[in-house]
Image: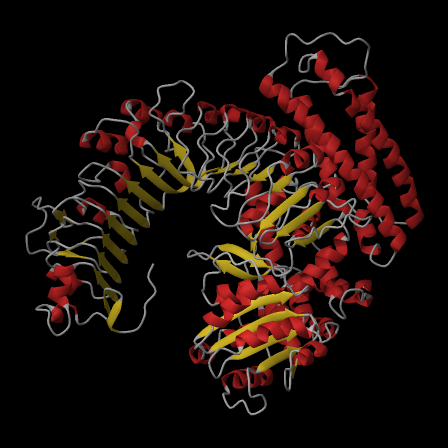
Amino acid sequence: MADAIVNLALEQLLQITAKKIGEEVRLVGNVENEVENLRRNLKAIQAVLVDAEEKQVQDETVRNWLDQLKDTSYDMEDVLDEWNTEIMRLQVEGDPEDAPAPKQKVPSFFPCSCFGIKQVVLRRDIAQKIKEFNEKLEIIAKEKLRYNFKETSIETSERARSTSLVDETAICGREFEKNLLVSKLLDERNEEQKDLPVISLVGMGGIGKTTLAQLAYNNDEVKSHFDTRIWVCVSDPFDEFRVAKAIIEGLKCCTNNLVELESLLQHIHECISGKKFLLILDDVWSEDYDKWKKFYHCLKNGSHGSKVLITTRKKTVASTMESVNPIIMKELSEEECWSVFRRLAFFDRPPKECEKLEKIGREIVAKCKGLPLAAKTIGSLLRFKRTRDEWQRILDSEIWKLEEIVKGLLSPLMLSYNDLPSGIKQCFLYCAIFPKDHNINKDHLIKLWMAQGYLGFDNDTEMEVIGQEYFDHLASRSFFQEFQKDDDENIISCKMHDIVHDFAQFLTKNEYFTVGIKWGSEDLVINTSNEKARHSMLTLHVEATFPISISSIKSLRSLLIDCEGSRCSMLDDVLPNLFGELTSLRALDISARIVGANLIAAIPKEVKKLIHLKYLNLSGQGVEELPETLCELYNLQTLDISECTKLKELPQGMGKLINLRHLINLGTFSLRYMHKGIEKLTCLRTLIEFVSSSDGSKACSTLACLKDLKHLRGRLKIRGLGNVTNVSEVKRMQILSNKEHLFYLKLYFDKDGEGERKNDDDELLLEALQPHPNLEKLDITSYRGSTFYSDWIMSLTGLRELSLTCCPNCMYLSPLGKLPSLESLLILVTSVKKLVTRIENDGAFSSSTSVILFPKLKVLNFSCNYKWEEWDYGNSILPCLTSLLIDRCPKLRALPDGLLQGAKNLQLLKIENSDLLEERYRKGTGEDWQKISHVPNIRFNLSYLQGGPLPLR
């Protein structure tokens, strides 16, 4: 880990000096020599760090030497960051003309052309600190000679290779255990245990207990056998309150803000009554029978046939929980272990190459000692080693002799870790900040990496792309697992195996710590082991009080606060002290997990003291305004104010946040306008919602402010389009056409104040808002035009989803039928009596000619169209339509015959709250039932007439 920290300090030093050279700024006096010595010392130490990292595991003196180096490097990075911040501040605010002359001559490396004399006086301590760091580094550099480290060349450009994930859903071996477990779960005889049976999987870490439990949990027979299934990761310590809440959530019952354990247990007792359930308690450690007894008594209220399955490393835990005949998980056979390894190591490799590597591969597998996690980890590593020599070096490594964490698992993890590039090592170790079994959001994690400088310091680079590459790199090497994906198969979140988490904590020692704070106590004890902690995550349970003592750990660079309940005591008067003391923070998350919890009413002006801060998450808080001093955080990259539903405006000085890349303001409907300074935030990648104001003030933003924000990506919602008066200016500036990475656009034609807009105004404005052709999703709301025909809409060849909401005059949909990639169309709230989806007769087609419209449309949804009476369909054909949903369209008399006859792939027809249609098409009584009877799934008002449940998009 020390190599990554030294690399960061060196990169930051080079970046600052390069910036100054680029500005034709020359360091003066002795400080220039000190900076050069600093660079030279760092380079000399950097050359031996790869070898030192490997030796530290067995040699405590090397570990202590690295700790000393890390502490110095961290402190040095703070000073360099302070130096860089001062440069940015003067770039933004300029040099005050009224700065008084200094009373004495001070050593300075700040140029007169860029820095005022007053600023030189204020920053003179930086020069002195650099000199002190040099003295420390010279001592550290001399000490390294004692250890005879080998020097290793360091690559200057370090980017992860693009990789693909291997499908790990298949499970090798364990046939006997799989069959035995499933049979126990399905067995209702209860001969061995009259009450609620407890089944247990027992085995050492990494043996595959959780994987086997997941297999049973998702088994089709098991799923159909139980009314409900609940999965709870218990881990250590056994938190009764959290486990109780997780069980209630699994039962899909409301907790009603219950805070007492007895109340929660009683709620479980009531919710579980009459249900045959399967409860899986994963990773149980506690041998305290009294804790388990409370749960067991309330769980017995379930129906006959209910089961509890636990996974544990300790036989005594299974005995404590009165589990009869536990399933003991033994090591895999050598052939089963080889299957796990081969699937990963030989993935996408030519057969001849596999044959040449098989013999040495089997020798490596023998060292995995039958542990599937070890085989998986080392197989993932060797997947990227192409030559036999590289495999031989892995086989011959001394690291196989290490046994410090868990038998047989440290060695393959250490080998895989040592093979990571330096920057990616740091990213992996950062994950130690999360508690075990934590669901890690990928985008959140990448932004936290950015905040620590792990993805570079150059604001022009696509740090987010580098972060995605690093994440993929770690995922492909099995450091992450249990991926959750979106509809497009992009990873949203993941978890870490608890052994991998142990390994990360082993390497970081006391730099990372996670603490749970319960009601009535402050469970955070500051001692010598965490005085120099750098990263912490606090979990505040319901009604817990924020631990003020955290302010004494002044070295913290990350503080993530997870408030589990809506009644955590996060007092506003705590924050000024927190901001005043923890001035090294790079990442601060004080979000409220429960929307509307409003744990914080105001952000104090002392926030300006967090000069290093790059990530600030205030989402879900009850703040009405943000202090102007927040705009002095020149390093800030991410500001998350999502679901701050009381926030009325952003600070006037927002334009000073020149490094801001992500302004995440999802759900801030209370924002009335944005200040014009937002146009200066040219680094922005994320702007969830932009508000165009009707206020004529020069301080308020207009659509023109979006023009230079060319890096915007992902999604963008524009509110207040009804306030736009100068449409020709919008068309001339082409504010959206240069945003090639914008894939989801929402256009709200709402208006502030009095007065109505004409239909033509909206049609002209829509034409002027031409986005880049890469757009994939489009949502148009409160549009007053009658048609959506425009050159740019027809040019959206990649558009997949289109929603038209509260468009009262929308009548002609036929132009949209030419969109070649459209898969989903939603029409919500129109005021017209007739909708036209047919092609108008222009002479090219006769009235009897069938025309294919919407060639890829799968889902068509009409909702809340209360005046709609007629659907003018003509002879159109929708060849791919699978779902037709009509809800709250009470005056629609009939569905087009041509639609029902031509939609050969229609799988779902849903008609709700539409009386005329229901009467016409109901089975047995409806005059046109036969026209829809071929559809496999038909639903009227939540009841299926035929077929089984079909998930809706």
Task: Answer with left or right where residue 269 lies relative to residue 760.
Answer: right
Q: Position of residue 634 (x, y in %)?
A: 60, 28
> Residue at left 72%, top 78%?
316
Q: Position of residue 820 (x, y in %)?
A: 27, 50
Residue 155 in sight from this viewpoint: no
Q: Position of residue 344 (x, y in %)?
A: 60, 67
- Quadrant in which residue 447 is drawn: top right
Task: Answer with left or right where residue 867 lies relative to residue 467.
Answer: left
How was this image coloured? secondary structure
Q: Position of residue 285 (x, y in %)?
A: 69, 70
The residue nearer to you, when weighing 429 against 7, is 429
- Quadrant in which residue 91 is drawn: top right
> Residue at left 79%, top 50%?
50
The residue nearer to you, when weighing 333 against 250, is 250
The residue nearer to you, when weighing 16 against 680, is 680
- Quadrant in which residue 314 is drawn: bottom right
Task: Answer with left or right where residue 601 lies relative to residue 387.
Answer: left
Task: Answer with left or right where residue 322 lies relative to residue 869.
Answer: right
From this view, report whether residue 244 is shown above or below residue 772: below
Residue 544 in sight from this viewpoint: yes
Quadrant position of the C terminus in the picture: bottom left
> Residue at left 27%, top 44%?
805
The residue nearer to you, when weighing 626 against 597, is 597
